[in-house]
Amino acid sequence: GVVYNYNEEGIHRAETGWEQCISIPLVQPDMFGLLQQWDELLEEFSAGEAWLPHRYDEHDHNCYTYALAFINSVLAAQGKPQMSKSEFTEKFVIPETKRASKYLTLHQELMANDFYIVPLPDEEKPC
């Protein structure tokens, strides 16, 4: 997909360059209808004056602020309470970061000990 991000140059849309990022699932199974509107909502949100390049601040108005503000705009449109930075970090960012850390540690151990993983042939894959 397309990754939206915000920095001192403003909003960027990129289809490549984010292959090693951590994807945090935000849409719950009962909200899959929202996925249909997600890109439209994100494009509309990103056009706001709040995300002009001159408003960027490394500590207080950055890519994290942008992502959280978008999430909160979707929550507000659904009549749900907004999340604080600490709540979002605790509920979504920290758990995914821990999971990625475990994966990276396992990968490093496998590489350091000359192990490698080979995919099973199609007929041997479990259903």
Image (cartoon, rainbow, N blue to C red):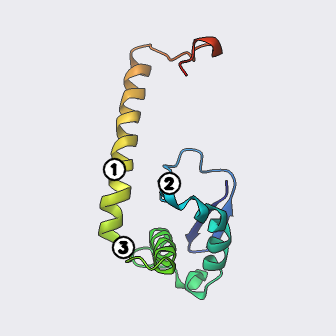
Asked if residue 27 shows in the view, the reply is no
Instruction: From the image, tell me which residue sits under label 1.
Output: 95
| Mark drawn on residue 29 | 2
Q: Secondary structure at mark 2?
A: helix
Residue 50 versus residue 97 in the image, above or below: below
Q: Secondary structure at mark 3?
A: loop
Residue 100 versus residue 119 in the image, above or below: below
In the displayed orientation, state which residue is furthest to the front.
30
Q: For the residue carrying disc 3, how many other residues have a C-alpha within 10 Å: few (<14), some (14-19), or many (20+)?
A: some
| Mark drawn on residue 83 | 3
Front disc: 1 or 2: 2
Q: For the residue carrying disc 1, how many other residues have a C-alpha within 10 Å: few (<14), some (14-19), or many (20+)?
A: few
Residue 67: percent from the left, percent from the top?
A: 49, 69
Alpha carbons under labels 3 and 2: distance apart: 20 Å
**Residue 77 horizontal side relative to residue 17, left or right:** left
- Of residue 126 and residue 87, the one placed in the foreground of this image is 126
Identify the image quadrant of the C terminus: top right
Q: Earlier in the sequence, mark 1 or mark 2?
A: 2
Front disc: 3 or 2: 2
Q: Earlier in the sequence, mark 3 or mark 2?
A: 2
Determine the residue positioned at 62% across, 77% down.
46
At label 1, the amino acid type is Pro
Residue 108 versus residue 89 in the image, above or below: above
- Of residue 99 and residue 59, the one placed in the foreground of this image is 99
| Mark drawn on residue 79 | none
At label 2, the amino acid type is Pro
Determine the residue positioned at 30% across, 68% down.
86
At label 3, the amino acid type is Met
- Of residue 116 and residue 58, the one placed in the foreground of this image is 116
